[in-house]
Image: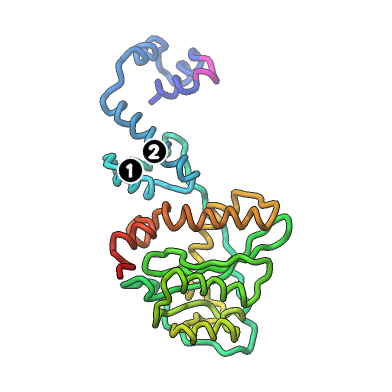
Amino acid sequence: MRYRFVDTHKKVWPINLMCRVLNVSRGGYYGWLDRPPSERAKANAALDEQIKRVFRLHERRYGAPRITRDLQDNEIPCSRKRVARRMRSLGLRALQSRKFKVTTDSNHDKPVAKDLINQDFSASAANEKWCGDITYIWTDEGWLYLAVMMDLYSRMIVGWSMQRRMKQDLVCDALSMALFRRQFPKDTIVHSDRGSQYCSKRYQKLIEQHSLRCSMGRRATCYDNAACESFFHTLKVELVYQRRFRTRQEARTAIFKYMETYYNRLRRHSSIDYATPERFEDSKGALAG
């Protein structure tokens, strides 16, 4: 390890100085250079290249667990501990979490629905349980509001809407997209918080017209909609906090690409055994027939 340190930093400090500080001989260092690499060293070097490839492909969004599964699925033998060890050696760190603020306007006197989820975010089939929520993204032109509808079976984002104002149309459009894409299922539980948009007459009419079952979490309890909050946190950490959006259209384009081409189709999700939402549904034949 000391010889490796000397070799890595030889353009920064003199070799003689490093050998003296590290208490190794200069001749020993040059002897180490002349020795052929061991089989373990060659295997580590090959694994390092694969780790760097996946890390770059996912734009620093993947840590050791997801990289490990990606490599294993491509028949590259490795363990999570070994990948984590090699990532530390390479100085690779995934994007770090930041505090996430929840925004809900529940100060209204509109009717609310019973909580049919009770913090059980599992589902045994597609279109059994959906959940929806709203977040906001800052741009140089002002706020852009995003509403999503997620299928809890696969964690796929099945509906979304982005608008400059947080009105009832925002959540209605997200629900309408989900209904269209999922071919108008019946009896689906549609869960949200008690925000005024979800309690609006237009949204509730959509629920009733399409024979859906409305569910709402308790007031000021973000854990009652944890799946959507988790998605928004991931979106902010992996995309929004890494960019400055000069216009709302620039933000719309980036968020669309993240949700539709990356999150739904490429990003592995821990709650579905590190499959992607799309692959998970395909493997289960979730929408067959």
The image shows residue 101 at horizontal and vertical percentages of 60, 65
Q: Is residue 64 above or below residue 251?
A: above
The image shows residue 119 at horizontal and vertical percentages of 42, 76
Please tell me which residue lies in front, 97 or 114. 114
Dominant secondary-structure state across the stretch colored magenta: loop
Which residue is drawn at the image coordinates 36% and 71% (left, top)?
126
Circle count: 2
Q: Residues within 10 Å of mark 1 (few under 14, many from 20)?
A: some
Please tell me which residue lies in front, 261 or 225. 261
Mark 1 or mark 2: name the one nearer the start of the chain.
2
Residue 34: mark: none
Q: Residues within 10 Å of mark 2 (few under 14, many from 20)?
A: many
The image shows residue 17 at horizontal and vertical percentages of 51, 15
Which residue is drawn at the image coordinates 29% and 59% (left, top)?
283
Which residue is drawn at the image coordinates 65% and 75% (left, top)?
167
Residue matched to label 1:
71
Q: Quick one: SS at disc 1? A: helix
Q: Is residue 13 covered in magenta?
A: yes
Q: Are marks 1 and 2 in contact (CB under 8 Å)?
A: yes
Q: Is residue 65 left or right of residue 168?
A: left
Q: Is residue 201 left or right of residue 50?
A: right
Residue matched to label 2:
51
Q: Is residue 33 covered in magenta?
A: no
Q: Quick one: SS at disc 2? A: helix
Q: Amino acid at mark 1?
A: Leu
Task: Kindly report the distance in space between the C-alpha atoms of the residues bearing marks 1 and 2.
Answer: 8 Å
The image shows residue 189 at horizontal and vertical percentages of 42, 80
Q: Is residue 123 above or below residue 82?
A: below
Q: Quadrant of the C terminus?
A: bottom left
| Residues rendered magenta in the picture | 10-14
